[in-house]
Amino acid sequence: MGHLGLPLLVVLFTVSGLVTWGAGVTLTKTTDTFDHRFKIGDALGGLIILGIAGSLRRDSYNRSLLRAAASLAPPNLELETADIASIPLFEGDMESAGMPEAVHTLRKQIAAADAVLIATPEYNRSIPGVLKNVIDCVSRPPDPPLTGKPVAIFGASPGPYGTIRAQHHLRTICSILAMLLLPRPEVLVPRAKEKFDLEGDLTDEATRELVRKMMLALEEWTLRRQRGKEAAGTGT
Ligand SMILES: Cc1cc2nc3c(=O)[nH]c(=O)nc-3n(C[C@H](O)[C@H](O)[C@H](O)COP(=O)(O)O)c2cc1C
């Protein structure tokens, strides 16, 4: 290769990366194919957030809340949503026989995401069993993907307390699994019926502003953690 060969290659690689970005290709990455040096998303500030709503209800307020978070997020933050409907009830025999494909898929999605955003309903002053089951399923060794992952939580309820008790329990679970939980802002959405319209769009301006602030804070929280890892030379 002549003396111009290497610089030319670097220029070609950079240009092709930017063209890929410009063409609007989704910034997906898996832990297998991830190349730390040429992470296009990071170069331009882009992050993938995996949204998990702890409700299977068709008109779920919490699924609507996740959708609102996606639309209110800063431009370089992309929200994908996890499908938890096919996650089976955890039991030890299933684990011994090998976890079902749906669990493997969710684990990979979590591992590939830069951060996770959980919208929790409140059931009997705690989180719904369906959400606890999802967390239990992906919490098993080796390499539980939520451990060390930046995470934000929020929730909506038709009642007056806006999931505060469910979020309190969820914070305990997050800390036990060593997730990196965004401390604030706390986003509680009480009286959800008054905050969403019939299409499930979040219309309450004060709540929209709070969600916007939380997404900005999650972006900063995630980037800070990634920069810290890079400085320590451990990568992702
Ligand atoms: C079994 C059960 C228990 C509930 N317990 C509470 C509760 O403790 N606090 C509360 O604010 N809402 C409670 N609710 C009402 C839920 O907040 C409401 O159904 C909500 O819409 C669920 O979230 P989703 O709309 O995302 O499905 C309960 C609902 C069910 C079905």
Image (cartoon, grey):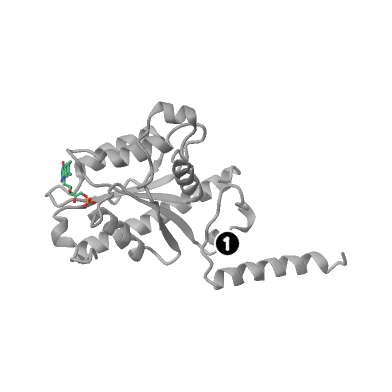
Residue 11 % position (x, y): 71, 69
Residue ID for mark 1: 40
Q: Is residue 92 visible?
A: yes
Question: In percent of the image, x 24 and y 65: which residue is there?
Answer: 201
Local crowd at mark 1 within 10 Å, few (<14), some, or many (≥20)? some
Q: Give the structural element (helix, strand or loop) at label 1.
A: helix
Viewer-closest of 64 and 78: 64
Question: In percent of the image, x 25 and y 63: which residue is there?
Answer: 208
Q: Measured along the vertical axis of the image, is residue 3 above or below residue 159?
A: below
Viewer-closest of 227 and 76: 76
Residue 31 % position (x, y): 57, 47
Residue 216 % position (x, y): 37, 59
Q: Quadrant of residue 21?
A: bottom right
Q: Measured along the vertical axis of the image, is residue 168 above or below residue 199?
A: above
Q: Amino acid at mark 1?
A: Ile
Q: Measured along the vertical axis of the image, is residue 134 above or below residue 47?
A: above
Q: Is residue 212 visible?
A: no
Residue 109 % position (x, y): 47, 49
